[in-house]
């Protein structure tokens, strides 16, 4: 058996992610709180309810848990509807709550990565047309400006919007997120509105905090062409542009190309100091006119049987390398893995996904691609959007019972803690946590045999 140490660069950020609505609890006046009241929208009609009680202050104990695992960063979001519950009225107590969270992270020597928009909108924004209303981008910029003024002293890294295309597609084409529409045209209009919102927020934050490092988290999926590839390859390429590349290209060129439409968005050009990668799943792509709302995609049976719930695709950590390569070569910006993980209530496969993912990241680093950090999805089990508290959607390093608020560390959390502490992944870790997978994950160098050459007769 081989022995090795995969060492990561000095200053590499190690952390986990959370999103405000998923962990805070309470009744924020946002689109998801309203959505949960509608029967059939959430798994078993669940509601966020107390979630992980972060609005009640239990973020502090979860930060302690992260610090004990040697995390040196944490990605979290603020809830726009708490800070601006009515148009133009900003709640000082809510801003102070987030200032306390930032101070708590700093006190634990953890770098905050602050996300401004993670799938939720204030009800007053939705009532005025949401991101279909051109004014929303300007209102979002005002919100960003206020936070830059009031929170910017403790924050260097800003993420404007999480997975804008996923938000648009889930809410306006697939109908699984608010407002539950099924129009591809409107979904693309919403994506354009979010792009303009990012650009406006970027400018607003820079005006207040010129040294701020501002990026956007883009979800990327891996796509295989269904056989025969000559027939289905064009579908794969078209989907790859739509889901993975169109928004990134627009942030570099100022031109948004979706399918047969091209929109000039000059204000979005060069509005990235870094780019975030939310590592997605793998799908098989091809023409399937019978299922247009599934984007002509399906998945194949994964080797380890790990699928995201409700058609989310196959967990495919090896796709990280290709996604990093394209983003690094096309964007030329520092890159952070802003979400990567697995839904695994039994913790049977999470360590395997973690090791396979970090193996891909380390490979990318050895190609000199500028990966600067890795954020595991997620720190604690939370309210998983349309999946609610479905046991199949437990992503956390720590289990969290939303009724009792009892946290339970999963074994994978200990592995991740060792990796963070060492700034490295070692064969010893793999052997201890994945004894049955070690040789397959890291096969030894084949032994060269001695060969005697005989002269020809």
Image (cartoon, rainbow, N blue to C red):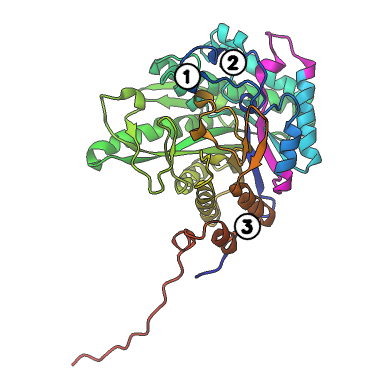
**Given the current orientation, which residue lies at the most extreme front position?**
404
Q: Position of residue 118 (x, y in %)?
A: 59, 26
Whichever of callouts 2 and 1 sits on the residue coming sooner in the sequence is: 2
| Image: magenta residue range | 67-93
Q: Is residue 107 a member of the stretch shown in magenta?
A: no
**Given the current orientation, which residue lies at the most extreme top position?**
128
Q: Quick check: 237 above or below 88?
A: below
The answer to which image quadrant residue 366 occupies is bottom right
Mark 2 lies on residue: 33
Q: Position of residue 239 (x, y in %)?
A: 37, 32
Q: Quick check: 134 above or below 398?
A: above
Local secondary structure at mark 1? helix
The answer to which image quadrant residue 263 occupies is top left
**Given the current orientation, which residue lies at the most extreme left position?**
457
Q: Position of residue 55 (x, y in %)?
A: 72, 24
User: Disc 3 to disc 2, how far (Cα)?
Assistant: 41 Å
Mark 1 lies on residue: 171
Q: Residue at x 41, y 30 (%)?
A: 242
Left or right: residue 166 versus residue 209 is left
- Given this view, does label 3 or label 2 mark the residue nearer the observer? 2
Whichever of callouts 3 and 1 sits on the residue coming sooner in the sequence is: 1
Local secondary structure at mark 2? helix
Does residue 268 show up? yes
Q: Position of residue 124 (x, y in %)?
A: 62, 8
- Given this view, does label 2 or label 1 mark the residue nearer the observer? 2
Mark 3 lies on residue: 424
Q: Quick check: 309 above or below 90?
A: below
Q: Residue at x 79, y 29 (%)?
A: 100
Left or right: residue 177 versus residue 408 is left
Question: Label 3: how many residues lie within 10 Å, few (<14), some (14-19) or many (20+)?
Answer: some
């Amino acid at each position: 058996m081989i022995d090795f140490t995969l060492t990561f660069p000095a200053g590499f950020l190690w952390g986990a992610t959370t999103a405000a609505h998923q962990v805070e609890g309470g009744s924020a006046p946002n689109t998801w709180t309203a959505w949960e009241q509608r029967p059939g929208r959430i798994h078993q009609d669940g509601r966020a309810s107390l979630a992980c009680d972060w609005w009640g202050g239990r973020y502090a104990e979860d930060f302690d848990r992260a610090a004990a695992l040697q995390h040196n960063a944490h990605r979290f979001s603020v809830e726009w509807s708490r800070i601006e519950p009515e148009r133009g009225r900003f709640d000082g107590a809510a801003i102070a709550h987030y200032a306390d969270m930032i101070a708590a992270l700093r006190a634990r020597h953890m770098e905050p990565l602050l996300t401004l928009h993670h799938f939720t909108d204030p009800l007053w924004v939705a009532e005025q047309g949401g991101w279909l209303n051109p004014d929303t981008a300007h209102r979002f910029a005002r919100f960003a400006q206020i936070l830059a003024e009031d929170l910017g002293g403790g924050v260097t890294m800003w993420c404007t919007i999480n997975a804008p295309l996923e938000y648009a597609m889930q809410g306006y084409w697939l109908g699984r997120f608010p407002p539950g529409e099924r129009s591809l045209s409107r979904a693309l209009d919403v994506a354009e509105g979010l792009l303009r919102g990012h650009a406006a927020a970027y400018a607003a934050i820079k005006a207040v905090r010129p040294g701020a490092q501002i990026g956007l988290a883009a979800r990327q999926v891996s796509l295989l062409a269904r056989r025969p590839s000559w027939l289905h390859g064009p579908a794969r390429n078209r989907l790859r542009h739509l889901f993975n590349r169109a928004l990134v290209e627009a942030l570099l060129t100022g031109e948004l190309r979706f399918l047969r439409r091209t929109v000039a968005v000059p204000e979005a050009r060069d509005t990235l100091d870094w780019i975030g990668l939310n590592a997605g799943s793998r799908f098989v792509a091809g023409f399937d006119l019978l299922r247009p709302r599934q984007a002509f995609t399906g998945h194949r049976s994964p080797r380890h049987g790990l699928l995201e719930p409700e058609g989310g695709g196959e967990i495919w950590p090896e796709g990280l390398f290709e996604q990093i390569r394209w983003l690094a070569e096309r964007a030329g910006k520092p890159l952070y893995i802003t979400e990567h993980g697995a839904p695994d209530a039994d913790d049977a496969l999470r360590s395997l996904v973690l090791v396979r993912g970090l193996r891909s990241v380390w490979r990318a680093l050895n190609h000199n691609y500028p990966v600067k950090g890795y954020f595991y999805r997620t720190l604690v089990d939370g309210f998983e959007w349309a999946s609610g508290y479905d046991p199949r959607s437990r992503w956390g390093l720590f289990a969290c019972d939303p009724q009792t608020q009892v946290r339970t560390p999963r074994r994978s959390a200990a592995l991740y803690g060792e990796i963070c502490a060492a700034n490295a992944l070692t064969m010893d870790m793999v052997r201890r946590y994945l004894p049955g997978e070690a040789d397959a994950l890291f096969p030894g160098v084949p032994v060269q045999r001695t060969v005697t050459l005989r002269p020809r007769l």
